[in-house]
Structure formats: structure tokens, C-alpha cells
Image: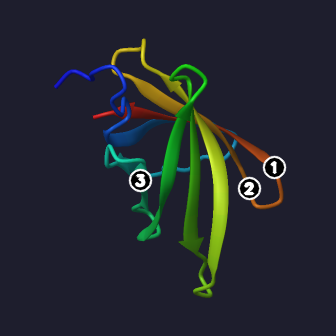
């Protein structure tokens, strides 16, 4: 289904396919965007999900996310992140730098629209 002007260009499922990192680890991450400004993030490795809202900005090149997740202790924590959207790649991609909790840069993670 083609996106109509003004439609949600990120609606659908986005799966991570590339993770460039100094740490050798496989990750199984998925974003699901509902087309109404909401998303679910699934971390299959740790069986965790988080939910929140998304806003597409900067002429369809940035996706700003605001969500909430629970840590191992069950405490809920809000977060914000920005993904770079490339609708010209085939398939379209979302990408973001990854950091540890202490701010150490791990690498770039790329999601492809499924």
C-alpha cells in the first residue's frame, strides 16, 4: 500500500538488521508503528517491550520517540530518542546510535521496514 501525502510513512514493522559495534553481540529488536502516532519496541533478547508515541519531523527525516520501559527491578522509566529516517533507501531504514547506560558509544543500529 502506498503512503498518501500526510499519511504515516513509518507505519508497519521495522526489524534491526545491522549493528556496528565494538561489542560483539547479536540483538533482536523490533519497532512496530501503528500509523496513529504510537509505537511498540520489542527487545526479544530480554523479553521486554516498551510503548510510546512517535512524531515524524524535519521533512520526514527524523522520528522522535517518547516512551516508557521497565527496568529489572520493575521500575518504570520514561525515555526519549531520535531515529534517522531514510525513505530513499530500498527498503526504507531507521537508524540510531547506541550507547551504554554510562554514555559509552557502542555503534550504529539500523532497522529495515519489513
Horizontally, residue 80 falls left or right of residue 88, namely right
Badge 2 marks a residue whose secondary structure is loop
Residue 104's label in the rendered image is: 1
Q: Is residue 108 above or below residue 29?
A: above
- Mark 2 or 3, closer to the camera: 3
Q: Measure how far apart labels 3 and 1 are at the Cα level.
A: 29 Å
Q: Residue at x 41, y 53 (%)?
A: 38
* Residue matched to label 2: 100
Pick out the residue farthest to the top.
88
Q: Residue at x 42, y 47 (%)?
A: 37
Classed neighbour count for the residue bearing mark 3: other residues with Cα under 10 Å, few (<14), some (14–19), many (≥20): some
Badge 1 marks a residue whose secondary structure is loop
Q: What is the image's colouring?
A: rainbow
Mark 3 or mark 1, which has the lower sequence index? 3
Badge 3 marks a residue whose secondary structure is strand
**Number of marks drawn:** 3
In what quadrant of the picture does the N terminus appear? top left
The location of residue 52, given as percent across then percent down, is 49, 59
The location of residue 87, given as percent across then percent down, is 42, 18
Q: Is residue 6 above or below residue 31?
A: above
In what quadrant of the picture does the C terminus appear? top left
* Residue matched to label 3: 38
Residue 16's label in the rendered image is: none
Badge 1 vs badge 2, beta-carbon distance below 8 Å: yes
Pick out the residue farthest to the left.
1
Res. 7 in view: yes
Amino acid at each position: 500500500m502506498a503512503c498518501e501525502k500526510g499519511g504515516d510513512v513509518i507505519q508497519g514493522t521495522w526489524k534491526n538488521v545491522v549493528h556496528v559495534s565494538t561489542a560483539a553481540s547479536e540483538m533482536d529488536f523490533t519497532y512496530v508503528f501503528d500509523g496513529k502516532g504510537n509505537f511498540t519496541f520489542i527487545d526479544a533478547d530480554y523479553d521486554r517491550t516498551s510503548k510510546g508515541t512517535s512524531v515524524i519531523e524535519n521533512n520526514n527525516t527524523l522520528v522522535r520517540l517518547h516512551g516508557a520501559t521497565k527496568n529489572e527491578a520493575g521500575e518504570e522509566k520514561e525515555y526519549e530518542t531520535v531515529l534517522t529516517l531514510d525513505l530513499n533507501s530500498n527498503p526504507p531504514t531507521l537508524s540510531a546510535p547506541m550507547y551504554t547506560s554510562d554514555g559509552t558509544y557502542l555503534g550504529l543500529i539500523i532497522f529495515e521496514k519489513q
